[in-house]
C-alpha cells in the first residue's frame, strides 16, 4: 500500500563545522513509510562504509519484504507486528554484514554504526534503534524522545547518577554501549506505537541532539511547522551555529492523513463472526 499523500517527509544531512567528511547516511522511502538514519564511526572513511551498508541493507530488505508479505498478521511468537519483525531482522542482517566486512577488510577494521529506523503501517509506527541516534515525537504540543540511548551516559541516568536535565549538559555523551558491526550479534530495541493524524516524528543523529536541547527542537518545529524543509534546515543551522562538532542528520515526518491497512476479504468475513 502506497502512503503517498498520507505522510509528508524531508531528509537532510550536513557535514558540520569540524569534520572533513560526512559519515552519516540517511534514506527516506516515503511511499512505503520507511525511514532510516545511521551514524558511522571508526577508521578513516570506514564510518561511512558502515553507515552505508546499514542503510542500504535495511532499505533493500524491508522494501523486498513489504512487497511480498502479508503485513497485517502479528507474529505469533512475540506479538510484534510483521513490520517490526521485518525491520528487526533487516538490522540484524546489516550487523552481520558490517561485522564480517570489518573483520575481512583491513581498512574497515573497528568500524561500526548506530542506526534508528521506523516503518509506518496501519496507523502505527514500528521503531527500531541501536546506539544513540534518536527518534522524537511531537503530539498535541508534547515533545518526547521515543528511543532510549544505548550509551554510558544513559546508563548513569538509569542508575541515578544524573538527572535527564544534567545529562543534556554533560560532556561525555558519545560513549555508545551498543552499535552495529561491533559484535556478531546485536540486540535491537523495538517499540510500536499508534500514530495520530498531525503527529510529527524526528529521526536524528547525535550531531543534532548534542548541539540543540530538546526544548529548542520542539520550539523550532512549532515555529516552522507549515514547512518541513524549513524545519530541517533550521535545525541543521542551529546545530552549526552552536558549534557543529559532528555530522548532522535529520529526517522529519508529518502525518497528514490516517493510513489504515487494507484487510483481505477473508479476514473481513472472519471479523464479522468474531
Image (cartoon, rainbow, N blue to C red):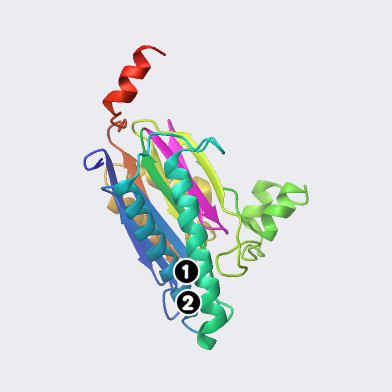
Height in image: 105 above or below 92? below
Tell me the residue that label 2 is attached to.
18
The dominant secondary structure in magenta is strand
User: For the view shown, which residue lies furthest in the top direction?
Assistant: 273
Q: Residue at x 77, y 47 (%)?
A: 160
Contact flag, marks 1 and 2 (Cβ < 8 Å):
yes
Write down the region rendered in magenta.
123-142
Classify residue 149 as left or right of residue 50.
Answer: right
Classify residue 236 as left or right of residue 146.
Answer: left
Task: Point out the tag, 1 or 2, that comes first from the N-terminus.
Answer: 2
Tell me the residue that label 1 is attached to.
244
User: For the view shown, which residue lies furthest in the bottom direction?
Assistant: 106
Magenta stretch contains residue 18: no
Where disc 2 sits, the SS reads loop
Height in image: 218 above or below 123? below
Quarter of the image where the N terminus is located? top left
Classify residue 219 as left or right of residue 225.
Answer: right
Measuring from the top left, give residue 103's x and y in whole percent. 57, 80
217 and 113: which one is in front?
Answer: 113
Q: Residue at x 53, y 42 (%)?
A: 191
Amino acid at each position: 500500500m502506497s502512503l503517498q499523500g498520507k505522510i509528508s517527509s524531508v531528509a537532510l544531512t550536513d557535514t558540520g563545522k569540524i569534520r572533513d567528511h560526512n559519515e552519516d547516511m540517511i534514506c527516506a522511502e516515503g511511499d512505503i513509510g520507511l525511514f532510516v538514519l545511521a551514524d558511522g564511526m571508526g577508521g578513516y572513511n570506514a564510518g561511512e562504509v558502515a553507515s552505508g551498508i546499514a542503510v542500504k541493507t535495511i532499505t533493500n530488505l524491508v522494501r523486498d519484504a513489504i512487497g511480498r508479505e502479508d503485513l497485517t498478521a502479528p507474529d505469533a511468537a512475540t506479538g510484534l507486528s510483521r513490520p517490526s519483525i521485518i525491520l528487526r531482522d533487516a538490522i540484524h542482517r546489516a550487523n552481520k554484514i558490517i561485522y564480517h566486512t570489518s573483520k575481512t577488510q583491513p581498512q574497515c577494521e573497528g568500524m561500526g554504526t548506530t542506526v534508528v529506523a521506523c516503518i509506518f503501517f496501519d496507523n502505527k509506527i514500528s521503531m527500531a534503534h541501536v546506539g544513540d541516534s534518536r527518534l522524537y515525537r511531537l503530539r498535541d504540543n508534547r515533545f518526547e524522545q521515543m528511543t532510549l540511548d544505548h550509551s554510558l551516559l544513559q546508563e548513569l541516568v538509569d542508575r541515578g547518577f544524573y538527572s535527564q536535565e544534567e545529562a543534556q549538559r554533560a560532556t561525555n555523551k558519545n560513549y555508545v554501549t551498543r552499535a552495529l558491526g561491533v559484535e556478531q550479534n546485536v540486540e535491537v530495541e523495538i517499540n510500536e506505537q499508534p500514530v495520530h493524524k498531525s503527529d510529527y516524528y524526528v529521526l536524528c543523529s547525535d550531531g543534532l541532539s548534542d548541539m540543540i536541547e530538546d526544548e529548542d527542537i520542539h520550539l523550532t518545529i512549532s515555529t516552522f511547522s507549515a514547512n518541513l524543509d524549513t524545519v530541517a534546515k533550521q535545525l541543521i543551522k542551529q546545530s552549526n551555529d552552536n558549534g557543529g562538532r559532528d555530522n548532522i542528520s535529520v529526517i522529519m515526518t508529518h502525518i497528514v492523513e490516517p493510513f489504515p491497512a487494507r484487510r483481505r476479504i477473508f479476514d473481513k468475513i472472519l471479523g464479522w463472526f468474531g
